[in-house]
């Protein structure tokens, strides 16, 4: 009972935070967009890109061939409900709870898009294949771009779009592959089930789409998590250090360096900043006419004690 009360208290505190509502909005919007990608670009063409949506299309087709009509959105809901148990116990409660929300709303959101504007209205009667864009490759590209962006956003807040992403996260956690490679591995396994219902050509297109999906997820993830490694050499080391620590709220390291040309000994400040924090630093240096030699490079992955958000950000 005490554990139940503690869990309930923790949940109530989480609901009262701005972070909860921000992430809830991000997850809802991201899934609404992902549902549009599945409904308009995957379902009509019956492309089986490595995803639970693709697997659901295969299962739906098998049931249809057996004379049993089951909607793709219904199968998506059932499979995601099963995979959520794996997410909760193998990955973690936070990931599992967030994914429970996103996964369970995918099917209903596909139904909402069907009510808003059925994909049949977008397919030309003269089209050789049931494709919204009129070409399977264009449908594939549109779907992969939409889904990859949605996946990257979800992964960045320790959530997922459900289904394949749960399997990918398990592969990522226990086998230590990059998340994009994990998406590809899990997707290829699912994509091969399409051999039961689709021609060889469509399966190959799906496999290519799965591979591209993994590459784009990695690209989006690096773009979302990219930081700036800033190196500053200046006579005003102390005031720059004070601004980084007390205004931006980041740590920094100070090294003694000697100029190879002049022989002058100076101090170099190194700090890891977000893009917005780097912009704030450059603006402050210009406004205060601080003379400095600055270099900055991109860092795509950060581990250890560096926090995603400033620890004690203060206004200027």
Image: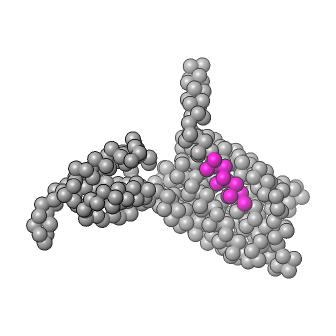
What is the count of numbered marks? 0
Using the rendered image of the protein, determine whether residue 227 is visible from the camera's viewpoint.
no
Left or right of 246 on screen, residue 260: left
Q: Quick check: 72 above or below 11? A: below
Residue for point 68% across, 58% down? 33
State the residue at coordinates (51%, 65%): 219
Residue found 65% across the figure and 71% down from its top: 141
Which residue reaches farthest left? 263
Task: Look at the image and give the residue range highlighted in magenta.
Answer: 25-36
Q: Nearer the viewer, residue 47 or 140?
A: 140
Camera-nearest residue between 207 and 285:
285
Vertical comparison of 114 with 174: above or below:
below
Instruction: Report x, y in % for residue 163.
Output: 65, 52
Q: Is residue 293 visible?
A: yes
Q: Is residue 206 left or right of residue 112?
A: left
Residue 197, image x, y percentages:
77, 66
Residue 145 lies in quadrant:
bottom right
Q: Residue furthest right?
A: 67
Quadrant occupied by the N terminus? top right
- Which image quadrant is residue 55 in? bottom right
The secondary structure that most of the magenta stretch takes on is: helix
291, above or below 161, in the image: below
- Does 176 appear in magenta? no
Residue 256 location (% of width, % of height): 16, 56
> In the depicted view, which residue is nearer to us: 159 or 192?
159
Q: Position of residue 87 (x, y in %)?
A: 59, 44
* Colouring scheme, one of rainbow, by chain, secondary structure, one colour: one colour
Residue 119 horizontal side relative to residue 228, left or right: right
Residue at image coords 27%, 59%: 290
């Amino acid at each position: 009972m005490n554990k139940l009360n503690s869990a309930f208290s923790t949940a109530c505190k989480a609901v009262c935070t701005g972070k909860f509502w921000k992430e809830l909005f991000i997850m809802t919007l991201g899934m609404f967009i992902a549902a549009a990608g599945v409904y308009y670009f995957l379902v009509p063409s019956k492309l089986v890109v490595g995803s639970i949506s693709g697997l659901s299309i295969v299962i739906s087709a098998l049931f249809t061939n057996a004379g049993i009509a089951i909607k793709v959105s219904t199968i998506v809901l059932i499979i995601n409900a099963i995979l959520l148990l794996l997410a909760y116990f193998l990955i973690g409660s936070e990931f599992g709870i967030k994914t429970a929300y996103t996964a369970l709303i995918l099917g209903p959101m596909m139904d909402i898009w069907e009510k808003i504007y059925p994909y049949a209205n977008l397919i030309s009667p003269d089209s050789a294949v049931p494709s919204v864009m009129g070409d399977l490759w264009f449908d594939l590209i549109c779907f992969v771009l939409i889904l990859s962006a949605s996946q990257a956003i979800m992964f960045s807040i320790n959530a997922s779009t459900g289904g394949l992403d749960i399997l990918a996260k398990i592969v990522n956690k226990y086998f230590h592959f990059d998340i994009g490679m994990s998406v590809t591995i899990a997707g290829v396994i699912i994509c091969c089930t399409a051999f039961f219902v689709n021609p060889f050509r469509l399966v190959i297109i799906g496999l290519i789409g799965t591979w591209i999906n993994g590459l784009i997820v990695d690209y989006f993830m690096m773009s979302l998590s990219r930081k700036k490694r800033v190196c500053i050499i200046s006579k005003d080391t102390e005031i720059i250090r004070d601004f980084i620590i007390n205004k931006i709220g980041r740590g920094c390291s100070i090294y003694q360096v000697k100029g190879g040309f002049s022989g002058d000994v100076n101090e170099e400040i190194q700090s890891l900043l977000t893009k917005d924090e780097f912009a704030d630093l450059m603006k402050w240096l210009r406004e205060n006419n601080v003379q400095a030699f600055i270099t900055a490079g991109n860092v795509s992955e950060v581990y250890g004690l560096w926090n995603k958000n400033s620890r004690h950000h203060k206004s200027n």
